[in-house]
Image (cartoon, helix red, strand yellow):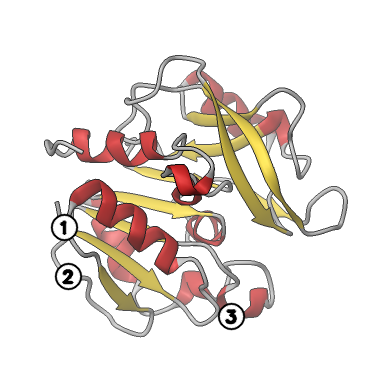
């Protein structure tokens, strides 16, 4: 399983993501600079967390217009798995690969803590290792994680089973509409989520709840985790 991580100025979670991918696949991911125009051959492309371009204009807005994103969009259209975590989720929305926007947290404060997530779709390439409605723990660290979309879009996401994760047990840290923490595109090969599953994959982290996402992807691509 070949993986690639896109690195933007201000990205700061690429090493965490690389460690998770290495643990799941046994292979070293390729780091791709945002100014490149072509991605390497990869089964999975990841946009990790951080503060790309200092979150100027809107979080992810400048990153979404980086040269490499044209190929990310092309690969997404061809069916390659694309994962965006935190700032990566914001960038996927700004690039039009996912609907809606990530606004300032309702508290107007940066939040950094653990939350609980309900896995609301276990049929996707990113979630099939989890049980239906399973509650998992996951860290968050963001200032602009308040997901919003028009009512018709929320209705579509719900009806089509494209809400992959919801904040559970009253732990919504940002005011996201309908407690939405992660969503899929129509084809099901693009996932964006605000929490950081890559930071809860081993006992030293305090748990392994996040590993299910990486096992799901390796399983979906025909590789044992």
Q: Quadrant of residue 38?
A: bottom left
Identify the element where label 3 is drawn. helix
Marks 2 and 1 in Cβ contact (< 8 Å): yes
Front residue of 222/191: it is 222
* Rendered position, 191 above or below 14: above
* Rendered position, 160 above or below 71: above
Left or right placement of residue 148 versus residue 73 in this view:
right
Please report whichever mark, 2 or 1, sits nearer to the chain's N-terminal start. Answer: 1
Location of mark 2 (residue): 40
Query: Can you say which quadrant of the picture contains the C terminus?
Result: top left
Q: In which quarter of the image is residue 104?
A: bottom right
Left or right placement of residue 109 versus residue 12 in this view:
right
Mark 2: give few (<14), some (14-19) or many (20+) Cα within 10 Å: few
Dot in front, 2 or 1:
1
Identify the element where label 1 is drawn. loop
Q: In percent of the image, x 64 and y 67: which residue is there?
A: 59
Please report whichever mark, 3 or 1, sits nearer to the chain's N-terminal start. Answer: 1
Residue ranking furthest to the top = 132
Using the rendered image of the protein, determine whether residue 149 is visible from the camera's viewpoint.
Answer: no
Tell me the CA gap for discs 3 and 2.
Answer: 23 Å
Q: Which mark is residue 53?
A: 3
Q: In percent of the image, x 36 and y 85: which residue is there?
A: 35
Tell me the CA gap for discs 2 and 1.
Answer: 9 Å
Q: In percent of the image, x 40 and y 59: which residue is there?
A: 17
* Rendered position, 58 above or below 2: below
Residue ranking furthest to the right = 107
Tell me the CA gap for discs 3 and 1.
Answer: 27 Å
The spot of residue 136 in percent (x, y) is 54, 28
Q: Residue 2 carries which label?
A: 1
Q: In percent of the image, x 88 and y 50: which residue is there?
A: 107
Identify the element where label 2 is drawn. loop
Marks 3 and 2 in Cβ contact (< 8 Å): no
């Amino acid at each position: 399983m070949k993986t690639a991580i896109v690195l933007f100025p201000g990205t700061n979670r690429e090493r965490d993501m690389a460690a998770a991918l290495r643990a799941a696949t046994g292979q070293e991911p390729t780091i791709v600079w945002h100014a490149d125009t072509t991605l390497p051959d990869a089964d999975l492309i990841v946009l990790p967390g951080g503060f790309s371009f200092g979150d100027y204009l809107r979080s992810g807005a400048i990153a979404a217009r980086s040269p490499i994103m044209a190929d990310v969009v092309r690969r997404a259209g061809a069916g390659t798995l694309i994962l965006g975590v935190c700032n990566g989720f914001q960038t996927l929305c700004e690039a039009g690969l996912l609907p809606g926007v990530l606004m300032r947290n309702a508290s107007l404060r940066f939040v950094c803590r653990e939350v609980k997530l309900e896995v609301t779709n276990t049929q996707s390439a990113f979630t099939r290792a989890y049980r239906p409605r399973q509650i998992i723990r996951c860290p968050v660290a963001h200032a602009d994680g308040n997901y919003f979309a028009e009512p018709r879009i929320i209705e579509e996401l719900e009806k089509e089973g494209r809400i992959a994760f919801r904040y559970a047990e009253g732990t919504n840290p940002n005011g996201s509409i309908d407690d939405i923490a992660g969503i899929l595109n129509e084809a099901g090969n693009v996932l964006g989520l605000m929490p950081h599953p890559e930071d809860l994959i081993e006992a030293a982290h305090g748990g392994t709840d996040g590993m299910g996402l990486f096992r799901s992807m390796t399983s979906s691509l025909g590789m044992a985790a």
